[in-house]
Image: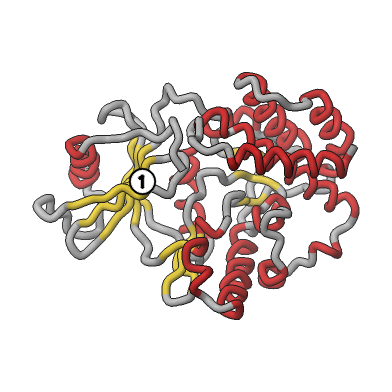
Amino acid sequence: MNNSIKVSICESTLIKMIRKAAECNAFDFNCDFSQISYSEMTGGFFNTIYIINFGDIEAILKVSPLKSSKVLRYEKNIMRTEVEVLNIVKNKINIPVPKIYFYDDIGEIENLEYFIMQKINGENLKSVSKQLSDEENNAIVFELGKINSKINEISNSKFGYFSQLTKQSSSWGEAFYNLVSDILEDGKDANVLLPYDEIEDIFEKHLYVCDSVKTPKLVHRDLWPGNVLINNKNISGIIDFERALWADPLMEYYFSNILKNKYFCDGYGINLNDLDEESKIRRTLYNIYLYLVLKIECYYRNYTSSSQNTWAEKRLYDELKKLK
């Protein structure tokens, strides 16, 4: 989706980035600059992403928006989040995630933050699902549920976004309220028309349901089919951890009313119909937060299409009605 956040870099800048990584011995393969070619991937909504071809080996280069770009509060420093989380996951559990080769947040090259990582073979589930049978799709989503449960096994001492250290808390209720307050402030800053007092009142009245969540767990939060790679009808990679946070696992994307899926839940080992009343309220609060993010980000990205804004607004008001 076209937007005003993604940066565009020239070939000489791209080569400088790769050369700096090579000079630091970042790659576990031979980097022959005479064979390098590249192409931009157009599917991302935030970072600019390139496939770098080193001859027989490919890698991914991700370039963050400029520091001066107008982004949501939680999106500040999220490239560092992705690098940190990928390294944590790589060291803690056995799931297919890419290896980070090199990360540069110093900004010596055109004041840009970027990293280079392993390219995992496969196409995303969103693009290939229509080519698969129902049985094949269900088997993949079942396996994805198992993988997501492994991610949620990783724990921390505090709740909150990686990129928002000062707003982390040992209380999930407090940390979650900080998340909500930030996105509402983002909306006000961008003059997004919303019933702010009503939304704040709903969260204040129902925040007690977060008290039962005691242990901060690693939550991907953006594990939709576009971030699941498929090769030979099997999951070959899980990508895009930049929006990860320490939270309640029930906040995961596949538990939302967008992608609620029986096969995912079976693989994960949960039955959403068996949730107690407080857990169901938490899930509704997480839906509201998700739709707030999806609506308000439209005013920061300046998308050329209004479809996401319209879609997210309708779903937001539907969820708010449940807790009035």
Q: Secondary structure at mark 1?
A: strand
Q: Nearer the viewer, residue 170 or 291?
A: 291
Q: Position of residue 183 (x, y in %)?
A: 66, 30
Q: Is residue 176 above or below residue 146?
A: above
In this orientation, does residue 106 appear? Answer: yes
What percent of the width, then of the height, locates residue 180? 71, 32
Identify which residue, 18 or 259, lies in the foreground.
Answer: 259
**Quarter-wise, where is residue 243 in the image?**
top right
Regarding residue 116, the answer to whether it shows in the image is: no
Task: In the displayed orientation, state which residue is furthest to the left.
Answer: 34
Q: Is residue 271 above or below residue 161?
A: below
**In the drawing, does residue 172 fall left or right of residue 246?**
right
Report the residue at 68% width, 71% height from top. Answer: 263
Question: What residue is disc 1 on?
Answer: 49
Image quarter (top left, top right, bottom left or bottom right) of the C terminus: top right
Badge 1: few (under 14), some or many (20 or more) residues near its Cα, within 10 Å? many
Q: Residue at x 61, y 49 (%)?
A: 221
Residue positioned 47% across, 62% down in the render: 127
For badge 1, the amino acid type reads Ile
Is 51 located above or below residue 48 in the figure?
below
Q: Position of residue 215 (x, y in %)?
A: 72, 49
Give how far across and how far down residue 136 sits, in percent: 56, 78
Numbered marks: total: 1
